[in-house]
Image (tube, rainbow, N blue to C red):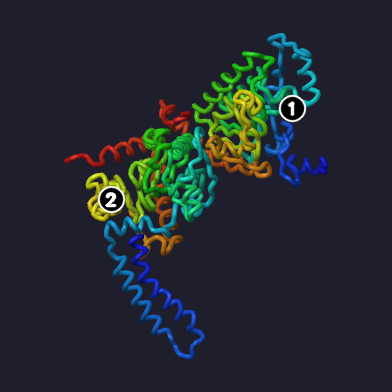
Amino acid sequence: MLYRPDLVKNLFVCTTCKYHFRMHAFDRIAMLIDADFVEIGADVVPGDPLGWTDKTSYPQKLERDREKSKLSEGVVCGFGSIGEFPVGLGVMDFNFRGGTMGTVVGERLARLFEGARERKVPIVVCTASGGARMEEGMLALMQMAKTTVALQRFRDDGGYAITVLTDPTTGGVSASFAFQTDVIVSEVRASIGFAGRRVIEQTIRQKLPDNFQTAEFLLEHGAIDMVVERSALRALLIRLLDYGVGARRTAQSAPANGRASAGTTS
Amino acid sequence: MNAIVERERGLLELEERIADLKAHAADQPVDLSAEIAVLEEKYAQILREIFGHLTPWQRVNMARHPKRPLGSAYLAALDQFDELHGDRHFGDDRAVIGGFAKLRGRRIMAIAQDKGVDTKEKVARNFGMPRPEGYRKVRRLVLLAGRLGLPVVTFVDTSGADPGIASEERAQSEAIAQSIAAFSEVPVPIVATVIGEGGSGGALALALADHVTMLEHAVYSVASPEGCAAILWGDAAKAEEAAARLRLTSDDLKAFGIVDEIVPEPLGGAHRDPRGTIGNVLSSIDRALVRLANIPPDELRARRYEKFRRIGTPA
C-alpha cells in the first residue's frame, strides 16, 4: 500500500520498489526550479487544422484532456533557475494526449529555444511523449523540423542544451530535439525508443527482451550519457549546468566561421 | 612473463626479510636496527642497480607492469568526475572512460583509456583496446568540450586500437581518423599524458594535444615492438630488438619534439608510489592548463597547427 502524501514527498517514486511514476509537469517544475518560474507560450492553444473526428471530435478530446490534466497542452515552457543557474525549461506531460507533439507543443518549444538563445541561457528539456500527434497529421510531423531548426540555431550560437528523458519518450520527440542536445540523461527504467514496442513486435513477429528500450538498454548501446534516479536528478542537473558556464564565452570568442570549430552534430 | 616483474621477484625475498625483522624488532631483547639499516641499504643499492638504467625493452615492460596505475586511477584522483557514456550510435566502449570533471577547481573534459584491473574488468574493457565506438565517444566528448569551452585532458594507455573483425566492419580507421580530426579543430586547450603504453594510432587518437606529457617509463610507438618485429622480420620474438630500434622512450620522444614534458617516476616505477605519481601528473597537467588558459582560441589552434606541422620535417 502506497499513500499519496508519502508518494508526493518522495517525488512520485515508490518508497519500497523505487518505481518512478510519471510526473505532472507542474510537479516536475516545482521539483527542479529554485523558486520562480515564468511560463511562456501559455497563450498558444490548439486549433483543429484537419477537422478531425473519430469516436469524438479532436476539440472534444482536447477539452477532456484539459480537464483531466489541468494543462492547456502537452508541454509547459518557461524560464527560471536551477541551483541559481538561469535556464529555459520545457517539461512535457504524458497526461495530455500522451504527451504527443502537435503544433502547440512544437511552437511552445521553438519559442523556448529562441528565448533561451536571446537570453543566452542553457536549455533543459524534460521529455515524455508518445510521438507526433495523429490528429494534426503532417502539421504535427513538421514540428520535428520546427523544433530542430530552433534548437540548432541555439546550438550554433554556442548554446548548451540538456535533455532529461522520462517515461516514455518515443517517436517524433525522441527522433528530433530530444536526441539533438549536448547531454542526454534518462530517469531509471524509463521506456525510450523510436517505434513503440507493440509496433515492433507486430512488425517483426518476435518477442522482445524485457529490458528492450529501457534507459539502461540505451546506456549500454551508447545512445545516452547517463541514467539517474529522480532523487538525484536536480543535483546532477546543477553539476551539468556548472560544467557549462563557459559555453557562451567560447562561442563569443570563437572566430566568425566558428560553426566548423564548434563542431556540432556528426 | 613481464621482465620487470621477474626482476622484482629477486627483490621480494629481501623485502620480506626486512619486513619480518621490523615486525619482530619490538619483541626481541636485542637491538636489530643496525641489521635493518644494513639490509635496507643493500636493498636500495640493488634497486638502483636494477632500475637506475632501464633498457627500452625494460621500459616497455614497465609500461605494461600489472600493477602500474591505470587511467581510472587518475580519474578517481580528480576533484569531481561525472562520466558521460556512449557514441550515440552503437555502444558504450568501456576501454575509454570520459566525462566532465574538475582538476584543482578547474572545469575540464577528462578522457582516459583503461586496461582494467582484474580479469573480469580487463575483459569488460577489452584490455584497454578501444573499438570504433570508443573513438566515436572520444570525438563526441572532445567536440562537446569545444562547444562548452572546457579544456580537454587525456590519459593515454593502450597497446593499440582493437584489431578485430567487428571493429573493421564498423570502420575502425574512420573512427580513429575522426577522433584525431576533432582534436585538431577544437578551440580549447588540450593536454595529453601518456601514462603507460602509447600504442600507435589508437593512442594518437587521444593525443593530438597542445601539451604532450609522458611519464618517464611510458612508451609511445608507431607499433608495438612485437608488431614491428612481425612486420619487418616476420618474427614477433624479436620484440626486444625492435623496442631498442623504435626509439619509443620518453627521452627519445622529447628529443624529437614529439613530447613536451617528462614526469619522473619513483625508482622502480610508478606502481611503487601510485599516489605520488598520479599527484605529479595532475600537477603537471594543471601547470600546462594554466599556461594555455589565456591563449585566444585562434592562436591556440594556430600554435597547434605549427606544432604538428613541424614534427619530422626532413632537413
To which residue does mark 1 refer?
A95
Q: Residue furthest left?
A: B315
Residues B269 and B308: in front is B269
Up-down: is B290 above or below A93?
Answer: below
| Apparent side of residue B244 relative to residue A77 in the rendered image (left or right) | left
Residue A43 is situated, as x and y percent measured from the top left of the image, at: 71, 19
Q: Is residue B259 visible?
A: no
Q: Residue at x 51, y 86 (%)?
A: B27
**Helix, strand or loop under label 1:** loop
Foreground tag (1 vs 2): 2
| Apparent side of residue B177 relative to residue A161 in the rendered image (left or right) | left
Image quarter of the N terminus of chain B: bottom left
Identify the mark at residue A67; answer none if there is no mark.
none
State the count of labels.
Answer: 2
Q: Chain of mark 1?
A: A
Q: Quadrant of residue B303?
A: top left
Residues A83 and B228: in front is B228
Image quarter of the C terminus of chain B: top left
| Apparent side of residue A88 relative to residue B167 in the rendered image (left or right) | right
Residues A217 and B150: in front is A217
Q: Residues within 10 Å of mark 2 (few under 14, many from 20)?
A: some
Q: Amino acid at mark 1?
A: Asn
Identify the mark at residue B236; answer none if there is no mark.
2
